Amino acid sequence: MIYSTGQNFATGGSGADERENPNPNSSRQPDPTPRRFISHEPTPADAPFGEFDDIVVWLSPYVLYGRMIAAGRLP
């Protein structure tokens, strides 16, 4: 998984969903596990759940390894 806090670089940003990503023990989560992330389309600050500009991308380990090898980061 690749995770970015988006353009505002907020860890726990202003939107409800943004606050979930860096906070695995949030009270909104029924099962507070450290490997839970929220991902959806970006939303503006005036959206019902506030601003969301975090980026979460899931890659197969094989795709990630292939890209790292192509970039010269793995032998």
Image (cartoon, rainbow, N blue to C red):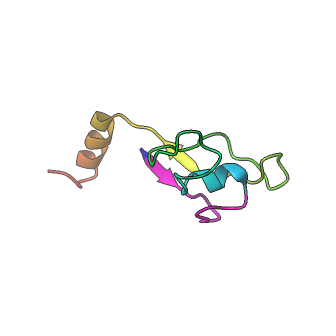
Q: Residue at x 26, y 40 (%)?
A: 66
Residue 16 in the image: state x and y as whole percent. 71, 52
Q: Is residue 12 above or below residue 40?
A: below
Question: What span is in magenta?
Answer: 2-14
Q: Is residue 55 left or right of residue 52?
A: left
Q: Is residue 3 magenta?
A: yes
Q: Seen from this angle, which residue lies furthest left? A: 75
Q: Residue at x 85, y 53 (%)?
A: 46
Q: Residue at x 44, y 38 (%)?
A: 58
Quarter the N terminus occupies: top left
Residue 5 in the image: state x and y as whole percent. 56, 58
Q: Is residue 65 magenta?
A: no
Q: Which residue is nearer to you in this view: 73 or 41?
A: 41
Residue 49 in the image: state x and y as whole percent. 78, 47
Picture mark count: 0
Q: Which residue is nearer to you in this view: 32 or 56?
A: 32
Q: Is residue 54 above or below residue 30?
A: below
Overall secondary structure of the magenta section = loop
Residue 53 seen from this side = no
Residue 14's image quarter? bottom right
Q: Is residue 5 left or right of residue 65?
A: right
Q: Residue at x 14, y 50 (%)?
A: 75
Q: Which residue is nearer to you in this view: 24 or 7?
A: 24
Residue 25 in the image: state x and y as whole percent. 54, 52
Q: Which residue is nearer to you in this view: 18 or 64?
A: 18
Residue 36 seen from this side = yes
